[in-house]
Amino acid sequence: MPALLAVCVMAVGCNAPATLQMSSSEIIRNDLNDIYPEAGVESLSLEGAIDRALEYNLDARIAEKDYQVAMSDADLQKLSALPSLTAKADFLTRNNDGASSSQSTITGTQSLEPSISAEPTRFTSLLEMNWNVLDSVLSIYRSKSAVDRAIIAEERARKVRQNIIMDVYSAYWRTAVSRELGGRIADINAESDRQLENLEAARSAGDLEQSRIHSAEVEMLEKRASLLSIYEEFSLAEIELKALISYPLDKPLVLIYPENIFEFDSFMNIKGSAEDFVDFALKKRPEIAEELLNKKIAERDVKLQIYETIPGLNLLVNANYDENKFLVDNRWLSLTASLTQNINNIITFSSRYERAKQQQALADARRRALIAAVAAQVYIAKRLHENANDRYAALNRLSKKYTAEAVRLEKRRDVGLIGGLEFVNISMDALIAELKHLNSAASVHSTFARFANSIGFDYSDYKRLDLFTLAEQRIGGGNG
């Protein structure tokens, strides 16, 4: 036996899972390969970015695994309703005969000569089925809650996907803004450096008053700082986008979108009353579905406390075999039926029942609080999007005014009517105005994604409304 045990241990060791035999560095390297799968593409449209995020995003994959685990738990809960089945085989032996005799209770004398009724060496076997009927019924009842919890995990995964769509939607357009202006900011910074050098040269030569030079330098540096401050909001957008879609951070990525994508009079006008959108959200939001399921679970748990106080019927069925030659029948069946009850279940029923009722009341309170929060979120998201559209319209007009003035002054500079310093200043003003305008355009996209998320839009809803064409849309209460 020791030799056999050693062989078994060696066999188990040789067949250990590969992950247990890998070094920490190998595990991390494999994790990185899994986090950043082969890019496959170097250019993405908005729809392509969302497709990739939904497939590779780590939060989405975790949510999907949680759902799969919850489904497995539900299946196991159902299987626990089955009766237990035990198989047993025994080898019995002793070094002498197990002889015995009897003594009379009347005379006190031996009434039977020593005899044996069992062989000293023999095999026995037993097949036993044990079924507690009440436990099986309770397991079936609990399995309904386990299924509801699996559905809750599915709803949570759905919410994760909705959040991913919102985040990708926002990060994509902020990245587009950084691409639109990144090169131009570098050009204007280079030109401002030349003008600052000219001002320094003028200071050294005494061509201009020191106060005028100082004022010009301060004005230009302040505008430059303002420009960089606004651009900083977009400088990390590409990293965020790559992280969301699990794209290698060091790989180049080209965004595909129509020209003049940020030139629009209005975008995604939301038509319809907020009340209609709230009603739509209460039917679509995964969180509401989760709380409704929690209510069912809590109600079921209240009934479960009552059922657990019922005595359980326990059935024990045995199929026996004993090769003992002294037995007339070596094979036989036996049945035992019994009623059992855990007295503690009766003693603690009142406390358990009260707690279950409190849990039910808590589920109701959470649901009502969530409904109020969802309503507020819809109102806020709708107002934010309306404000973003208004801000975009104002900044769009302002940017056009600055751009027109910059074009006019460029012509005057070309014919020598104004100096380079004045032109650089107005060019920086125009670029700041345009950056604010593009910032507001990206905000329109982001606030729309937030609104769509607040009413529970799924990916199918985006596609159904053809939101990826980025044409002007009017989202009405009837469409959600």
Image (cartoon, rainbow, N blue to C red):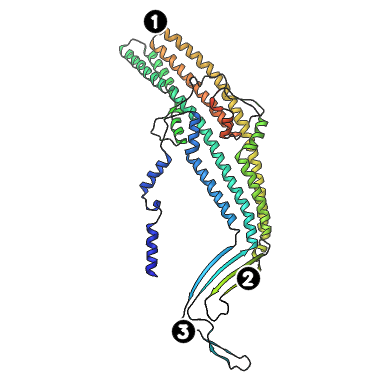
- Residue 167 location (% of width, % of height): 51, 33
Occupied quadrant, residue 128: bottom right
Gap in Å between the C-alphas at discs 3 and 1?
126 Å
In the rendered view, tell whether residue 181 sits above or below residue 286: above
In the rendered view, tell whether residue 236 sits above or below residue 197: below
> Which amino acid type corresponds to the residue marked 2 in the rendered image?
Leu
- The residue that label 2 is drawn on is 335
Question: Disc 3 vs disc 1: which is toward the camera?
Answer: 3
Query: Is the Cβ of the residue at disc 3 closer than 8 Å to that at disc 2?
Result: no
- The residue that label 1 is drawn on is 415
Secondary structure of the residue carrying numbered label 2: strand
Quarter of the image where the N terminus is located? bottom left
> Which amino acid type corresponds to the residue marked 1 in the rendered image?
Val
243 or 226: nearer the viewer: 243
Question: Disc 1 vs disc 2: which is toward the camera?
Answer: 2
Gap in Å between the C-alphas at discs 1 and 2?
112 Å
Query: Is the Cβ of the residue at disc 1 closer than 8 Å to that at disc 2?
Result: no
**Which of pointers 3 and 1 lies earlier in the amino acid sequence?**
3
How crowded pointer 1 is (Cα within 10 Å; few <14, some 14-19, many 20+) is rated as: few
- Residue 86 location (% of width, % of height): 55, 66
